């Protein structure tokens, strides 16, 4: 029995991701950006998608107890479960949404898109992993 257990340990398969208490733990890289005007009905009058240089790195970890750690290009933010929402939309799927001072940051679980809503100025900035047709 111990020899079998030792052989698994020797393979160094790494820690079980579920054992560390994270229910979501991903890093995303965004290479493209697009600015749009926005109102209560959503975005409109969007500019062209252009390269973001340097790229933006985003890390999001949601612990099993609901605490969220958000890293936006080195700036760290921490949220209680009551301070963010989790949802789903038909275009990009599941997402996490963080609101602060009437601004909103939406990070999609797939990593395809991140949206920063500047609600005071009626603007939304989309960050993309890749350019879509």
Image (cartoon, rainbow, N blue to C red):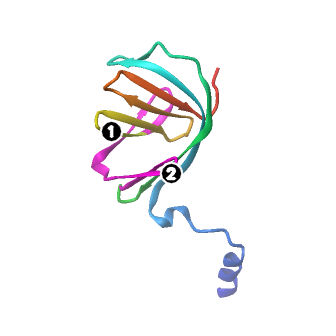
- The region drawn magenta spans 67-95
Above or below, 16 against 52 in this view is below
Asked if marks 1 and 2 touch (Cβ < 8 Å), the reply is no
Q: In the figure, residue 89 lies in which quadrant?
A: top left
Q: Provide residue 52's location: percent of width, then percent of height.
A: 60, 32
Q: Secondary structure at mark 2?
A: loop
Quarter of the picture holding the N terminus: bottom right
Say few, some or many: other residues with alpha carbon within 10 Å of mark 2 (under 14 / 14 to 19 / 20 or more): few
Above or below, 49 against 61 in this view is above
Q: Provide residue 123's location: percent of width, then percent of height.
A: 40, 23
Residue located 54% across and 62% down the image: 17
Residue located 35% across and 16% down the image: 41
| Left or right for 47, reference 97 | right
Q: Provide residue 27's location: percent of width, then percent of height.
A: 56, 49
Residue located 47% across and 27% down the image: 125
Q: Nearer the viewer, mark 1 or mark 2?
A: 2
Is 12 one of the magenta-colored residues? no
Say few, some or many: other residues with alpha carbon within 10 Å of mark 1 (under 14 / 14 to 19 / 20 or more): some
Q: Provide residue 104's location: percent of width, then percent of height.
A: 36, 34
Farthest residue in the bottom direction? 2
Is 70 one of the magenta-colored residues? yes
* First in sequence: mark 1 vs mark 2: 2
Above or below, 44 against 32 in this view is above
Alpha carbon distance from label 1 to label 2: 19 Å
| Left or right for 62, reference 112 | left
- Residue position marked by numbered label 2 in the rendering: 74
Q: Secondary structure at mark 1?
A: strand
Q: Of the numbered discs in the image, which one, if any, rests on residue 90? A: none
Instruction: State the predominant SS element of the stretch in magenta.
Output: strand
- Residue position marked by numbered label 1 in the rendering: 99
């Amino acid at each position: 029995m111990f020899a079998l257990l030792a052989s698994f340990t020797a393979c160094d398969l790494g820690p079980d991701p579920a054992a560390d208490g994270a229910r979501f733990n991903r890093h995303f890289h965004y290479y493209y950006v697009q600015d749009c005007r926005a109102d209560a009905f959503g975005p409109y009058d969007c500019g062209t998608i252009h390269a973001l240089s340097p790229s933006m790195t985003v890390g999001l970890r949601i612990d099993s107890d609901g605490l969220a750690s958000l890293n936006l290009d080195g700036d760290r933010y921490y949220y209680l479960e009551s301070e963010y929402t989790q949802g789903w939309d038909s275009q990009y799927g599941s997402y996490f949404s963080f609101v602060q001072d009437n601004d909103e940051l939406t990070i999609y679980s797939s990593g395809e898109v991140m949206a920063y809503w500047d609600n005071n100025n009626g603007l939304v900035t989309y960050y993309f992993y890749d350019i879509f047709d």
